[in-house]
Amino acid sequence: MLERTHLAIVREVARQGSLTAAAEALCVTQSALSHTMKKLEQGLGTAIWRREGRRLHPTPAGDYLLGVAERLLPQLERAEEQLRQYARGERGTLRIGIECHPCYRWLLKVVAPYLERWPEVDVDVKQRFRFGGIGALFAHEIDLLVTPDPLHRPGLHFEPVFDYEQVLVVNRDHPLATARHVEPEQLTDEVLITYPVESDRLDVYSRFLHPAGIAPRRHKVIESADIMLQMVAAGRGVAALPRWLVEEYAERLAVVPVSLGKEGIAKQIFLGFRKAEAGIDYLSAFVELARQERDVAVGALEWVPHADGCRHGDQV
């Protein structure tokens, strides 16, 4: 009969690549682990591992069992931790995953009032996942996913909580600084600075440059928004960022936001969660607070079409 111990062993052997390392990680002897795996393979009537040199690799049956382990074990571990928190009189931990760089700054402005209103709930923010954001939700690695690009899947719900516009950021003395909006052709001689993300996942490319068949003179990647804006302020290039973020920095840096195209590029921030957990009070309270706090968090920047653009945002 398949037991939780078997799943834990399969997962650890896959992570470590050998029975010896897995046994050490699980605090058991190698002989005991080998005996357990051999007995499981005999019971299932199929091999789970194949050896290549000193490393073990899963067979097709092992791959399937590993998938089961990756799905079920995090749920069991999460349930146990939740029950321990209840036993200590705590409500639990709200684990939030982030799929976009600018979203982190937005999230911080929602987390602060949330922690004040829900002192018995801890918040953990994750920016890296084993399976990507959607996979992390399904695998119970996180409880909420902050994303500008939801992938609607059965069992998941995405709630829009904030409208924003992606804009071009230029130096205050740049020729485009006084433009009502910018067209793709005007970036052919520019150094475009973005986050280190594939270009097809960046709105400035997928929704602005690529449809026009245009490429910038050079594409430069920088991980930090602070450094990115410092580079723009120093005249080292232009960037694509959320309008609200640019306007925060414009108070102390020589940067100006300009709409991308006549209509601008409108986006939304979504909070995704598992439908089955929509009734959890401290989770639904975070979603509601995100909606209530958006005016405070980003300066009440609602979308009103005008000559300079519309909303504010960056895909990733």
Image (cartoon, rainbow, N blue to C red):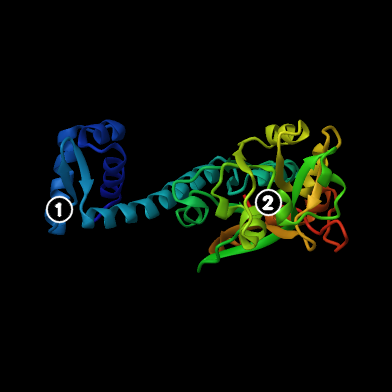
Q: Residue at x 75, y 43 (%)?
A: 109
Q: Residue at x 21, y 37 (%)?
A: 19
Residue 236 lies, in percent from the top left, at 71, 34
Q: Amino acid at mark 1?
A: Ala
Q: Residue at x 72, y 42 (%)?
A: 238
Which image quadrant: the N terminus? bottom left
Q: Which of the two residues, 93 or 84, is positioned nearer the viewer here?
A: 93
Extreme bottom residue here?
154
Precedes in sequence: disc 2 or disc 1: 1
Horizontal placement of 15 versus 173: left or right? Answer: left
The image's mark for residue 47 is 1
Q: Is residue 61 above or below residue 121?
A: below
Q: Which residue is mark 2?
A: 314
Residue 106 lies, in percent from the top left, at 72, 45
Other residues around mark 2 within 10 Å, as few (<14) / some (14–19) / many (≥20): many
Mark 2 or mark 1, which is nearer to you?
Answer: 2
- CA gap between label 2 and label 1 equals 48 Å
Q: Dot 2 lies on which element?
A: loop
